Image (cartoon, rainbow, N blue to C red):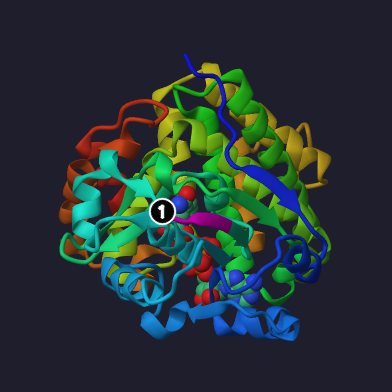
Amino acid sequence: MKQILIKPEIHSYDTFHTFAAEYALGEQDVILTNEYIYNPIMAAEDLKCAVIYQEKYGTGEPTDVMTEAILEEVRKYDARRIIAVGGGTIIDIAKVLVLEGADRIDDMYENMAELKKGKELIIIPTTCGTGSEVTNIAVLNRTKLGTKQGMVSQAMFADKAVLIPEFLGSLPYKVFATSSIDALVHAVESYLNPDATVFSEMYSVKAIEMLLEGYCRIAEEGTEAWKKDAEKYLIASNMAGIGFSNNGCGAVHAMAYAIGGKYHVPHGESNYQFFVPVLKLYERKVTGGKMAELKNILKACMVNGGFGGADSDESAIDLLRSLLDKVLPAKKMSEYGVVQEDIVPFAQSTVDNQQRLLKNSHVPLSQDEIQAVYQECL
Ligand SMILES: NC(=O)c1ccc[n+]([C@@H]2O[C@H](COP(=O)([O-])OP(=O)(O)OC[C@H]3O[C@@H](n4cnc5c(N)ncnc54)[C@H](O)[C@@H]3O)[C@@H](O)[C@H]2O)c1
Ligand SMILES: [Fe+2]
């Protein structure tokens, strides 16, 4: 059984300036980014490469329609490398841009086993969440299906992942919060995955420790404190990415895609909805084993960070809920527009479209149990 795969090589630089010089960015490159990420840091470099701003092709997280339009634009250049500088939205689109052959996203989903890479891919994450720089998945909203779905292929691994904390300077607090909660969900779902190995667990646990240490500082000092730990969050989200890249996320991600697809709730926020309720469900279904170990890890991290006392009776999951509330107050699904009539179709869509993720759940969940969690979160 495979124990761990870490791909690609991971580099880090203090500044984009040093990276641009070392990688000799030039006419052979296309940068995919957002204008408000490009202007404060990259514009000063007077780069000779083409620059594509994703927001000109649509707002929000990636859809098949947006990605096809950007693909058409990229084909106008004779680029050897795609440089993705952005959050998971930019990164996931860029993974599709390096594929050769098909023009239609639907065809790519149908022939995932045949996908081939035609260009080099260099990824610089600017949120501290997805870990997408070390995974071979791109998650797109398939507009005809009305849900988000992962496209998975070895051809979508980056050639280099580059961590440059300088980019996090412009990150709005809300995006920091939702993306880092996404990273925490990656670490926890990967840790609880029945296929986790001692190697993948090492990355998941380290990520959990680093994220919770930062969250405890936020609880104590206020939300601005995240900036002191920006580099730590960037590394933690990468490590969480290594964990789930090896065995996959589970029920929380599976359930998030239906609401993300229909109501365009940002990925980290939709995951946050179901994170604690799914952990509580696991807690009710299993005693001992990995779930008990996870609770020990969570509790130790929070107590060490000064959040909650070692002797407190509060369960680790309830304590985690209180800590997450300090980072970002949780919302109900109805606040995003979800109505009672969505609950049954959401549960059905999760079972029909997200088996890739559901099979990684800590313990199998029935459609009724999934529906009950949606109901609880309404
Ligand atoms: N492929 C994977 O392995 C994987 C894993 C998890 C999530 N995802 C996907 O990633 C997407 C979410 O990514 P995300 O949470 O990173 O958010 P995002 O990329 O959607 O970014 C959120 C917002 O923050 C802005 N932003 C990003 N970095 C910024 C910066 N440094 N300064 C100022 N603004 C900045 C973006 O332009 C955007 O408006 C979802 O589509 C999700 O499905 C993919
Ligand atoms: Fe995620």
Looking at the rendered image, the quarter that the C terminus falls into is: bottom left
Query: Is residue 330 visible in this depiction of the protein?
Result: no
User: Which SS type dominates the magenta stretch?
Assistant: strand
Residue shown at 19% from the left, 47% from the top: 110
Residue shown at 53% from the left, 61% from the top: 81
Q: Nearer the viewer, residue 142 or 35?
A: 35
- Residue 374 position within the rendered picture, expressed as x and y whole percent measured from the top left: 30, 51
Magenta region: which residues?
Answer: 118-122
Q: Nearer the viewer, residue 177 or 8?
A: 8
- Residue 192 position within the rendered picture, expressed as x and y whole percent measured from the top left: 50, 29
Above or below, comparing residue 181 to residue 170 in the picture: above
Going by the numbered disc 1, the residue's amino acid type is: Gly
**Magenta residue check for 121:** yes
**Mark 1, secondary structure of its residue:** loop
Residue shown at 44% from the left, 66% from the top: 266
Instruction: From the image, tell me which residue sits under label 1.
Output: 118
Q: Nearer the viewer, residue 1 or 318?
A: 1
Relative horizontal placement of residue 292, taking residue 236 as reference (left or right): left
